Image (tube, helix red, strand yellow):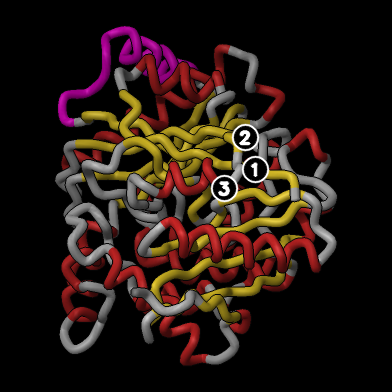
Amino acid sequence: MASPLTIRPVLTKRDRKIFVDLPFRLYRDDPNWVPPLKGEALGLITPEKNGWYSHAKAQLFLAEQDGRVVGRISAHIDTLALEMPAERGFGPGTGFWGLMDAENEEQFTALIAAAEGWLREQGMTRAIGPVSQSVWEEPGLLIEGYDHPPTVMMGHAKPEYRGWVERAGYLPVKTLYTYDLPISDGFPPIVNRIVASGEKNPRIRIREVDKSKFMEEAEIILGILNDAWSDNWGFIPLTEPEIKDIGVKLKPIVFNDLIRIAEVDGRPVAFMITLPDLNEAIKPLNGNLLPFGWAKLLLWLRRPKARTMRVPLMGVLKEFQSTRLASQLAFMMIEYIRRPSVARYGASRAEIGWVLDDNQGMRSIADAIDSKINKVYQVYAKTL
């Protein structure tokens, strides 16, 4: 007979390490789980190392039974989400939970009750999850697409989690899609004609970013992003501390020919970011850079070869979004990035996303280039 289940808060550095280590045991037999680098995972939950904490707070919990840790969860509040208009998804009284894992449903139910209890104590009236921890990290629970590994910065989960969440009283509030796209042989003729037409337009310029001017280029992209995504469900602008953190994390996998800025009459109006799938390089490391993992990763970063490219972000200024020019710029950036992805990096497929279920413009572009939905993530909500 199992001993009583105990839920306790994470209070120490050792607790945080235990929190990070747990998924390595729970997913060790799952061939499609990608072990994160433990240092990165620790940084995510350490306030001194994560700029997100400049406008947020969190409480982590561990579940213990029979003398061992059997589950974990994070409860958190983002002050910027509280300031958001409710029609954009969050708003006053909205808290979050995420980073959830457990051996069984009883443990999960106790963990989510602890997270909900903490949120209530903080005055929250609604819980949304999973969001781990910022919406810019890994929002949503994987509900379709368990049969292949996630790409960099996307989440994985056990199939049974969906039932556990829904039986805990949570209802779907937003669906996120990723799209699988073969890129070796190019795109349909109509897309190629649109690209060729744009190449003849002297007003349009599709340029590479200049990594030597990293912060200047980032400022341009963030300016477009904040305008393009401002009405999207769940959009929270990145703060200065977060931008610095993201710069440190992503700069090693930023390559000039994989990130494009579209200019019209010399004005930046759109961008597309593509990243080689770092997960392909870190999966064999099993979370550890020592003793030789760092050398293997460094070698890969110097001359990356990746089967998959991920497109995490694309944006067009709102004033252009209802025009033909928007889709033309998107197709041009996609094609201009496709070429070096295949020729230089050896990629044969790309993954686009995540894409909100109501983002008809992006979904239409994905359909036009013959991409197919390969993973579905669900975000849930519950009144507390």
Give 160 or 184, whichever is nearer the viewer: 160
Residue 193 magenta? yes
Q: Tell me which numbered mark, 1 or 3, is placed earlier along the sequence.
A: 3
Image location (x, y in percent) of residue 136: 56, 54
For image coordinates 72% across by 39% down, the residue present is 89
Query: In the rendered image, which quarter is residue 145 located in?
Result: top left
Mark 3 secondary-structure assignment: loop
Q: Which residue is mark 3?
A: 168
Magenta residues span 184-201
Mark 1 secondary-structure assignment: strand
Residue 189 lies left or right of residue 99; in this view the side is left
The quarter in which the N terminus is drawn is bottom left
* Position of 205 relative to 149 (above/below): above
User: Disc 1 and disc 3: Cα gap in Å?
Assistant: 11 Å
Image location (x, y in percent) of residue 76: 67, 64
Residue 93 magenta? no
**Tag 1: Cα neighbours inside 10 Å, few (<14), some, or many (≥20)?**
many
Image location (x, y in percent) of residue 28: 21, 66
Give 381 or 366, whichever is nearer the viewer: 381
Q: Which residue is mark 2?
A: 173
* Position of 36 relative to 273 (above/below): below
Query: In the rendered image, which quarter is residue 173 located in?
Result: top right
Q: Which residue is mark 1?
A: 381
User: Disc 1 and disc 2: Cα gap in Å?
Assistant: 6 Å
Q: Amino acid at mark 1?
A: Ala
